[in-house]
Amino acid sequence: MRHSVIVVICLNPALDITYQVPAVTWGGVNRPSAVYARPGGKGLNVARTLHALGADVLLMGLAGGPTGAGIEDALARLEMPTALTPIAAETRRTLTVVEGTGATTAFNEPGPPVSARELTEFRLRYEKGLSGAAAVVLSGSLPTGPAADTYATLIETATTACVPAVLDTHGEALLLGAAAGPAIVKPNLAELENLAGRRLSNLHGPDLAAVSVAADQLRISGAQAVVAASLGADGLLAVTGDSYWRARPAAAMAGNPTGAGDAVVAALAHGLVLGRPWDDRLRHAAALGAAAVAAPVAGEFSKTDYASALSAVAVHRNEVS
Amino acid sequence: MRHSVIVVICLNPALDITYQVPAVTWGGVNRPSAVYARPGGKGLNVARTLHALGADVLLMGLAGGPTGAGIEDALARLEMPTALTPIAAETRRTLTVVEGTGATTAFNEPGPPVSARELTEFRLRYEKGLSGAAAVVLSGSLPTGPAADTYATLIETATTACVPAVLDTHGEALLLGAAAGPAIVKPNLAELENLAGRRLSNLHGPDLAAVSVAADQLRISGAQAVVAASLGADGLLAVTGDSYWRARPAAAMAGNPTGAGDAVVAALAHGLVLGRPWDDRLRHAAALGAAAVAAPVAGEFSKTDYASALSAVAVHRNEVS
């Protein structure tokens, strides 16, 4: 048994294919000048980031067909420990066509259907994987089949096994999952707006008072702490029951925001397992999120960017009076 | 040993992925309403057509990576006998985005690199596969690596084994392959124009006299017979040394011309193995080509369309005086 392992759940991984095409001929035949294929999906990005941080990770989830096999091959080359449950249907692909101008067109395939029997098999493996785990991260969308309370029941199982859970999803799965009592929930602004049923930003950017209220409502529904991300230059906002926190990077980094939220989740889970106090935990999360924005590919970051961002994060705390 | 087996060579197969998207948002994120993935490539279409005709087929070629495994899986489901040589690089994909309006945008990945060692392994298997074969079909483009004379040397090996060869490729591989003495070469109009270095059609369509001359030059270079296809309503034109032939379907069918040339190749190989005389061989080839145009997917045809086209093909012969 490994007592420091972080189990990362990715129920709906993807093979992310990128075609570079100097200028696409729409309605014609194109020959990509470069083709890249790499495993993706939010949980996978979290696992890759934790792996790069030197954390002990076990990726669990569902994979099927040749595309699922391709993901397993690529993860094996990264020396990422995996325990993926096989499914009959084929794991989804995403295709991104990047033109010389930077224009980007994405095609996201629907997730594969997952049967009740396959989900049961996954749950059995999940219970084994939790044995001795230090934390579990549940991240991303659910595939077709599992009910919206799937993350909620997985969190309950983790709680029974005394393993703290970090949840990052959206919609009903987020609402039901938060109610199951995870240690940390990481919604982004759009998800909080969706739950609140109203806009939480104005012309000047996020309305931080309104974001705090929405985040605290999610906390009160069952989560121990809520960390709101994707607030741009405003960094992270956290509600931990006894305090409100803000962690701001020195400056918003230019780059690719895809995967920055996954880097924040990875840092929060890592901080939880390392026993970092909240100020330090948020400092690392804001810095790693900023470094991920600066990296061209989701799930990656430069250690130099991370270190430089870390030295410049400002953390503020307001205790609940 | 199976003495009626037709060995079909596909050195550069592909996984053909199709996304149906009601209307693509270029520069945005799209969610395909339907996703199809099937094995493709010219040799594969020939093999599938022969299989559907009830011929005894063995598909040989190169396949690598998860995409290659996906092709093998799909062929196993079709109960197609295969003996594919594994390669280290990944088999190519093609992606076709079909919009509700019918507008079609294709992305064709480059073929994988093939090492000299992998090609040697393929050649060893090929020699074994030829043992007792009734014919061999060499069809499609070469991947990256093998020299342009690859088909020529494979034809020489077949000739040594007394196995007649049918060749369908383009450019230098076609020129060198034809010189190696195959039983039949099937160029299309564009390939003949490329070899002749001039246009062979005018405002009214193909210039059949000029096509005959170009086809006969290819025959004289070493092939025993040349069948020119993709002449539209003009059907097929064949030069067999002692005769010029035309085989015209009753009417040009509307539909998808992709794969019609592969159906012609399949019918020519089948007719060769069955010992059909040229008039009958060309009648079947023209009819199957027409039925393939009427089918929505390359490598497929309706038996009803085939039978009805067959009854209406007109074959004309001019003996060389």
Image (cartoon, coloured by chain):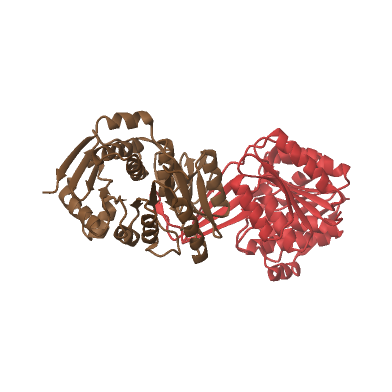
Chain colours: A red, B brown
Q: Residue at x 77, y 56 (%)?
A: A57
**Residue A106 spot, x, y in % from top left:** 53, 50
Give the image quarter of residue A23.
bottom left
**Residue B223 spot, x, y in % from top left:** 27, 55
State left or right for residue B239 relative to residue A20: left
Q: Nearer the viewer, residue B137 or A42?
A: B137
State left or right for residue B231 relative to residue B84: left
Q: Residue at x 63, y 48 (%)?
A: A68
Q: Nearer the viewer, residue B313 or B4?
A: B4
Count of labels shown? 0
Q: Residue at x 75, y 41 (%)?
A: A122
State left or right for residue A113 relative to residue B7: right
The answer to whether any part of residue A259 appears in the image is no
B235 w.r.t. A229: above or below: above
State left or right for residue A89 relative to residue B315: right
**Residue A13 spot, x, y in % from top left:** 65, 48
The answer to whether any part of residue B231 appears in the image is yes
**Residue A304 spot, x, y in % from top left:** 70, 71
